Image (spheres, helix red, strand yellow):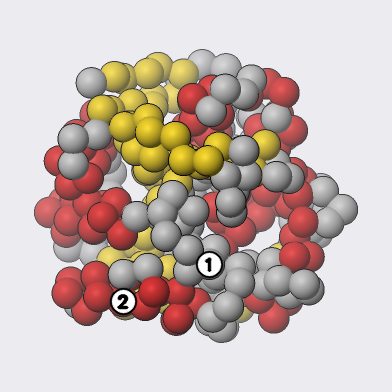
Amino acid sequence: MSIVAKIKCTDYSSSIATALDAIGAGARLPDDKLIIIKPNLTLADAPPVTTNVGAARGVLEYCRSHTSAEIAIGEGCGSGTTGDVFESTGYGDLAREFGVRLIDFNTAPAVTLSDPNALQLKEFHLPVIAQDAFIISLPVLKDHSFTVTTIALKNMFGLAPAPFYRGCWNKSKLHSPSTHKSVFDVCLYKSPDLSVVDATVALTGMHLAGTPKELGLILASFDPVAVDAVGSELLGHDPARIEYLQLANGPLGTMDDIQLIEA
């Protein structure tokens, strides 16, 4: 059974803390490895296209109060340069305020990994700094043009270094021939250790230019498949009919046995 917290959001800091307490996150955060908060900053547009910096602040504050581990914020943007995107979306200011590192996965040194169970990415270039890190996936709840929804699992595309996957945009090679299979494969190499989903204002219809929809919720889980299933339902989709979730169900988590904690 996988636990997913579904918490009404009054403000980011207190509601994210409530969601993470509900799944016992404080006791499970590591003290002996780097924690990387991974928002969805595919480009420099304002929320809900990108993860609100207030959500990152809430996660950062929670981590600081529950672990002595180093905490960083990491992303590899899909368009433009990650440094510019960090600055445009307020993450540069947040990092300076808290004294945390900003990591650009697009330019970080990478290691080449292989996995025979991968469906199409038989080799994957993973940033070395992410390999042994504790990754907190912090996406916005959004519909997606290629994968129906983009939540905790799809957010891990940001780990893929642009020099290896750039085409028309920084991650374009991950979208062919099957974006669904690439989601599975990327997470086979590095799945989120913890996921916090900003579902305060979702983006419906399309992941870059959709229609905002107020939901007023925060989701949290250690199981990215479970939290993606719950999030997909909130967007009006049947998780059992979403290919990347069908592929991930079992190997990367479960959407068949979910305990929902609501507050």
Answer yes or no: is residue 233 visible: yes
Which of the two labelled residues, at mark 2 and mark 1, occupies the earlier sequence position?
1
**Which residue is pictured at 69% across the width and 67% down the height?**
171
Residue sitting at x 39%, y 39% = 201
| In the foreground, 87 or 209 | 209
The location of residue 110, given as percent across then percent down, is: 61, 78
Task: Give the tally of numbered discs.
Answer: 2
* Residue behind mark 2: 92
Q: Mark 1 points at which residue?
A: 43
Note whether 144 is above or below 42 in the view shown: above
Camera sees residue 26: no
- x, y percent for residue 50: 45, 56
Separation of residues labelled 2 and 1 (CA atoms): 14 Å
6 left or right of 141? left
Residue 205 on image: x %, y %? 62, 38
Picture layout, residue 212 above or below residue 173: above
- Mark nearer the viewer, 2 or 1: 1
At horizontal 61% and vertical 72% (from top left) the residue drawn is 79
Q: Report the amino acid beneath label 2.
A: Gly
Element assignment for label 2: helix
Under mark 1, the amino acid is: Leu
Image position of 22 with respect to 171: above or below: above
Q: Quadrant of residue 57?
A: bottom left
